[in-house]
Amino acid sequence: MINQDKKEILIICCILFIQLHLFALLRCFLLNYNIDINILGFNKNNNKLLNGWAFTHFFLYLLLGYFYPNEYLFLIIIGVIWEIYEYLYSIDKIFLSKIYKYFCGKDGIYLILYNPYDPFINMIGCFSGVFLHSYLNNLKTL
């Protein structure tokens, strides 16, 4: 049913989920003092493909695709589920967005932004990692 690789991927995703929300809550707290630590948000309003958050998506899925090349379909499914979560969060349809609004005010739902290009960035990163894994393994056999 669920193999060891899938368990590891789910653990990594859970850790990242928690870290992202802790980061967002820290941003929320600091925004009350006019301090924003969104260092990855550069260029996000002008370009949804070339910004720091898009780069983290690509890099994360590159690593996951490299280390788990046989689980690329599972990785893509996890990525799509996460993006659905982000979309529901951004339109204030899930419980966590209400918690953020309570602590951060009406701008709380903008701390985690949905980007319609993220699933494609995730797939490109994943397949790049799978390709890199295959390429480097072929070099070792030469």
Image: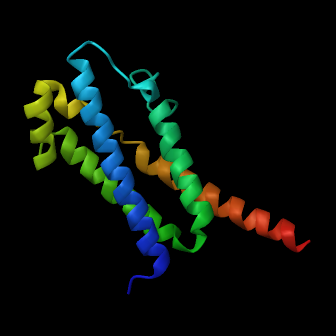
Q: Which colour assignment does the render follow?
A: rainbow
> Measured along the vertical axis of the image, is residue 61 above or below residue 73?
above
> Measured along the vertical axis of the image, is residue 115 above or below residue 31?
below
> Measured along the vertical axis of the image, is residue 106 above or below residue 72?
above
Tell me the residue at 45%/82% (across/down).
3
Residue 77 sits in quarter: bottom left
Is 75 on the left or on the right of 139, as rendered?
left
Tally of numbered tags = 0
Whether residue 113 is visible to the viewer of this picture, yes or no, is: no
Q: Furthest-right residue in view? A: 142
Q: Position of residue 67 (x, y in %)?
A: 60, 65
Whether residue 69 is visible to the viewer of this picture, yes or no, is: yes
Q: Position of residue 11 (x, y in %)?
A: 39, 65
Residue 91 sits in quarter: top left
Tell me the residue at 52%/67% (across/down).
72
Is 15 on the left or on the right of 54, as rendered?
left
Q: Position of residue 97 (x, y in %)?
A: 15, 41
Is 95 on the left or on the right of 72, as rendered?
left
Tell me the residue at 58%/53% (across/down).
62
- Quadrant where the N terminus sits is bottom left
Tell me the residue at 32%/54% (across/down).
82
Residue 69 sits in quarter: bottom right
Nearer to the camera, 81 or 101? 101
